Amino acid sequence: MAQVKLVHTLAERERYDNLAELFSIIVATEHLERAYIRDQISAQEYTPACQRLIAQFKTSISLLQDVVPSVPHFMAEYRLSCPAAAKRLLEVGIPATVEHAAEHVPSSTNAAKHVAETVQFFITLMDSLKINLVAVDQIHPQLTELIQSLNRVPSLPKTFEGRAKIRDWLIRLNKLKASDELSQDQVRQLLFDLDSAYAEFQRSLSSR
């Protein structure tokens, strides 16, 4: 029997390798999400693993943007039934522990350090927006650092509304391309939400 070649050029081989990597990232994310839901993995193990898969997914998509214009279509074509992965990678874009503030909260020993870091993240992000650094790949990492820092402040109440606003912005940005830029109205709204969250954060510290 004659051997059938699946690829004929190095470019074709690289394309199929990239498709295989995207496939494996989606499957791995599905298994990770289900393991976390079933309490088979701790929050401390889940968070960095999920962040790594999200970063790998974004890189993979950027390499395949001409081949895979639609990830849901890709999943349907290859019969990938991974609803948890689709939600985490395509909709939310941050680990469940960050989304729901379920990360391990450290003891109050380093409380002052975490508060100082959070203040710095607030100020840096607002200053960045004011000097027109408004691309998604400029804002998203800073918002992620901010919400993770907020989650590490032991005295912050679970009812802190600013966290929900930041989470909603992260989800909104995750649905855009890295090169997309926020409009003036969006920047104004984000600055307003950040300023409100910062004021609420300061009030929560004062009431301790």
Image (cartoon, helix red, strand yellow):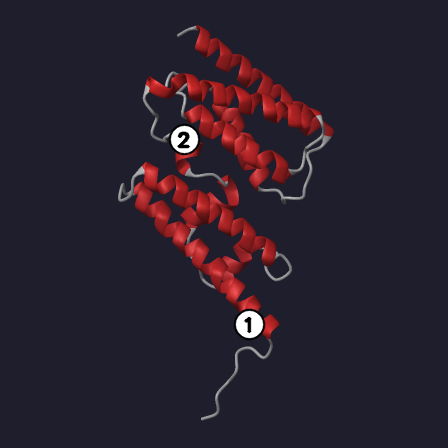
Quadrant location, the C terminus = top left
Q: Residue at x 50, y 51 (%)?
A: 56
Q: Is residue 104 above or below residue 116?
A: below
Residue that protrudes farthest toward the top in the picture: 207
Query: In the image, is residue 87 above or below residue 64?
Result: above
Residue in the image at 54% along x and 25% along y: 121
Q: Is residue 156 visible?
A: no
Residue 196, relative to residue 86: is it above or below? above
Give x and y (percent) for residue 160: 45, 18
Which residue is more in the foreground, 151 or 115? 115
From the image, tell me which residue sits under label 1.
13
Tell me the quarter of the picture where residue 107 sits: top left
Give the left or right position of residue 192, taking residue 18 as reference.
right
**Residue that numbered label 2 is attached to:** 100
Name which residue type carries label 1: Arg
Q: Are marks 2 and 1 in contact (CB under 8 Å)?
A: no
Q: Amino acid at mark 2?
A: His
Q: State which quarter of the image contains the N terminus.
A: bottom left
Picture residue at 34% right of the left edge, 25% below the top: 106
Other-residue count near label 1 (Cα within 10 Å), few / some / many at <14 / 14–19 / ≥20? few
Quadrant of the image occupied by residue 101: top left
